[in-house]
Amino acid sequence: MARSKELVPGVGRLSRSQVYAARGLHKGLKKSEKPAAPEVAPTKEVQVGGAKNGEKRTVPTQKAPRFYPAEDVRLPKKSHKHPTSASLRSSITPGTVLILLAGRFRGKRVVFLKQLESGLLLVTGPYKVNGVPLRRVNQAYVIATSTKVELGEFKVEDKINDAYFAKSGAKGKTSAEEEFFSEGKPKAKEAFPESKAADQKSVDSAIVAAVKKTEYLPKYLKASWGLSKGQFPHQINF
Amino acid sequence: MQATESNFKRFVEVGRVVLLKSGPQAGHIAVIAEIIDHNRAIIDGPTTGVPRQSFPYKHLTLTPFRLTKLPRAAGSGVVKKQVEAEAIVEKWEKSSWAQKRAAIEKRRSLNDFQRFVVMIAKKSRTDRVRKAVHAAKRA
């Protein structure tokens, strides 16, 4: 569509009549063909139970509302915005060492593997080095350092995706009594699934090998990051 | 009157090597080719990437180096020849002043991993020194 370029907020390059001419509105607006909505019958027949109720009844398909507001209230406008997954910063590539700033592992330096569909980053300690397992992490809570571990051809398996990290099933229902008596006692922990431990090992074996190639890098990943007096993140080179 | 007895050692004169304090070539050295007035001089650094231009003294620092044989109002070519003849840029780079500046710049540009390695190196050096001192004390 011909757009009138904005010179100043509220003032376009083209005047009202010039826009009319540019859009060709003298030809009339196009009528968009909307497919006809499927016909729905206004009433339907419903089986009714009970001995003296008669077997069938005609009932409207859409019930009338039980409640009408006293005054006509303005409905809020519907938003047409759609959430998109975050775009990856150019400084983050597979093998980049990231500093986690929040969460259980804040201050830890971890290796970036890939970005998942939800936009979250898949990272690993590696587990043997600093205790961080395969984990999802939000890009916003991460500092990307310029240090990169050379992963070469290594690619994480596709089975490790957002669904892999979904929490398993609902918690079993406990009666109020059981819950009352069990409060304060340590909860029974579920053993860490074997398959996940195996996945961790297989991913880490390649990464630990790459990390060991650089001197001091394993020590670096083991150490925690922190700011000391006189250090300001906007002035430090990461 | 006795021969010039002055508390000052570095003068603004033709041939004086100066260090630029501001502008796009901040941190580079150049040579004073001509004096304009009490505020400005024409400086030129053909080998150091400083274009020939007028520059206020306010934004210059005088160094202890000078080109002894530079004539007044010499063009860039002559300045270049003299700079190369006296190897003044090499002398500057070797001076402790220039080396300290380079060290500070390097320290500021370190990335997180490099700072970590420096920390490890400092620790190991301190450890060795401490052990040596202890051994010397016992002896």
Image: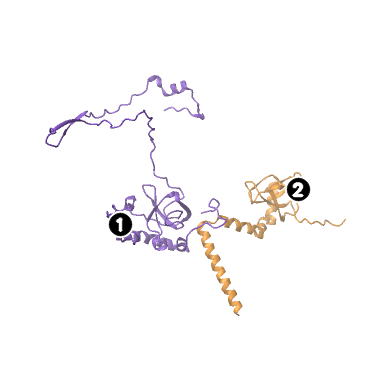
The amino acid pointed to by label 2 is Arg
How are the residues colored?
Answer: by chain
Q: Observer-nearest residue: B5 or A144? A: A144
Locate residue B1: give its quadrant.
bottom right
Q: Give the CA separation, mark 2 to mark 1.
A: 96 Å
Q: Nearer the viewer, mark 2 or mark 1?
A: 1
Residue drawn at x 56%, y 71% is B128
Q: Nearer the viewer, residue A58 or A158?
A: A58
The location of residue A235, given as percent across then percent down, is: 55, 52
- The residue located at (40%, 21%) in the rendering is A25
Residue B110 coordinates in the image, percent (x, y): 54, 56
Q: Residue furthest right?
A: B1
Q: From the viewer's side, name the closer residue of B23 and B130.
A: B130
Q: Amino acid at mark 1?
A: Glu
Q: Chain of mark 2?
A: B
Q: As displayed, is residue A11 above or below residue A118?
A: above
- Contact between labelled residues 1 and 2, with CB atoms less than 8 Å apart: no
Chain A colour is purple
Within 10 Å of disc 1 (Cα), the crowding (few <14, some 14-19, many 20+) is few
Name the residue at 54% across, 66% down.
B123
- Determine crowd level at label 2: few under 14, some 14-19, many 20+ residues with C-alpha closer than 10 A: few
User: In the image shown, does A204 or A187 lie closer to the viewer?
Assistant: A187
Q: Which residue is mark 1?
A: A179
Q: Chain of mark 1?
A: A
Dot 2 corresponds to which residue? B72
Hey, which residue is sitting farthest top in the picture? A26
Question: Which chain is painted in orange?
Answer: B
Residue A90: x and y in percent read 45, 48
User: Quick check: A64 left or right of B48?
Assistant: left
